[in-house]
Image (cartoon, helix red, strand yellow):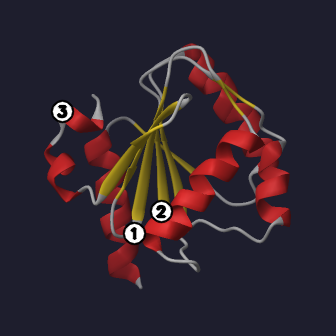
Amino acid sequence: MRLADSKYVDQVIEFIDYDFGIFYFFDDIIVSEMHEGITFNWKCAEKVIADAKRILGEDCRPHYISNRINEYYTVSQDWLKFFNNRYFLKSFSVITPHPSGMMNLIFERMFYRRRIFQVTSLHDAFQHIYELQEEV
């Protein structure tokens, strides 16, 4: 399900449709929906990080949901650049119905230093974040 078709769309502060995908910004959450067939790399990530800082604040540490509704590719080792630049996420959730999404996830787990939560729907991803927020 696309975020635009979900009950969560009313909570979006801002969304940006980049040439590589649509990113939805909430108070403390970013949801991505990449376009079909693209390769998401560090250059793409830098654009999103700059906009996240503008929208959510310079020191933001959002929860991130990757809503993998389309098949695309990631440069998994670019997570090292993310961490080397001292960027952090509160949590990282992945919704992946496609086989290529599973392959991306396997490689990302090799480079992403924290836990990646695999969920089956937007609802599950948001529920997981709400539960994490209650624990704090």
User: What residue is drawn where x is 56% and y is 29%?
Assistant: 20
- Quadrant placement of the C terminus: bottom left
Q: Is 71 left or right of 6, judged from the image as shown?
A: right
Above or below 135: residue 65: above
Q: Amino acid at mark 1?
A: Asp
Q: Which residue is mark 2?
A: 63
Residue nearest the viewer, comparing 65 with 16: 16
Using the rendered view, name the quadrant where residue 82 is placed: bottom right
Residue nearest the viewer, comparing 30 with 46: 46
User: What residue is drawn where x is 62% and y is 20%?
Assistant: 38
Which mark identifies residue 28? 1
Earlier in the chain: of badge 3 and badge 2, it is 3
Q: Residue furthest bottom?
A: 136
Mark 2 to mark 1 CA distance (whole Å) = 6 Å
User: What residue is drawn where x is 53% and y is 75%?
Assistant: 60
Which mark identifies residue 117? none
Q: Which residue is mark 3?
A: 5
Which type of secondary structure does the marked residue at label 2 adopt?
A: strand
Which type of secondary structure does the marked residue at label 1 adopt?
A: loop
Above or below 28: residue 113: above
Mark 2 neighbour density, 10 Å: few (under 14) some (14–19) many (20 or more) = many
Mark 3 neighbour density, 10 Å: few (under 14) some (14–19) many (20 or more) = few
Which type of secondary structure does the marked residue at label 3 adopt?
A: helix
Does the residue at mark 3 contact the one at mark 2 (Cβ under 8 Å)?
no
Does the residue at mark 2 contact the one at mark 1 (Cβ under 8 Å)?
yes
Residue nearest the viewer, comparing 17 with 74: 17
Using the rendered view, name the quadrant where residue 1 is placed: top left
Earlier in the chain: of badge 2 and badge 1, it is 1
> Where in the figure is residue 120, as x and y percent of width and height?
37, 35
Earlier in the chain: of badge 1 and badge 3, it is 3
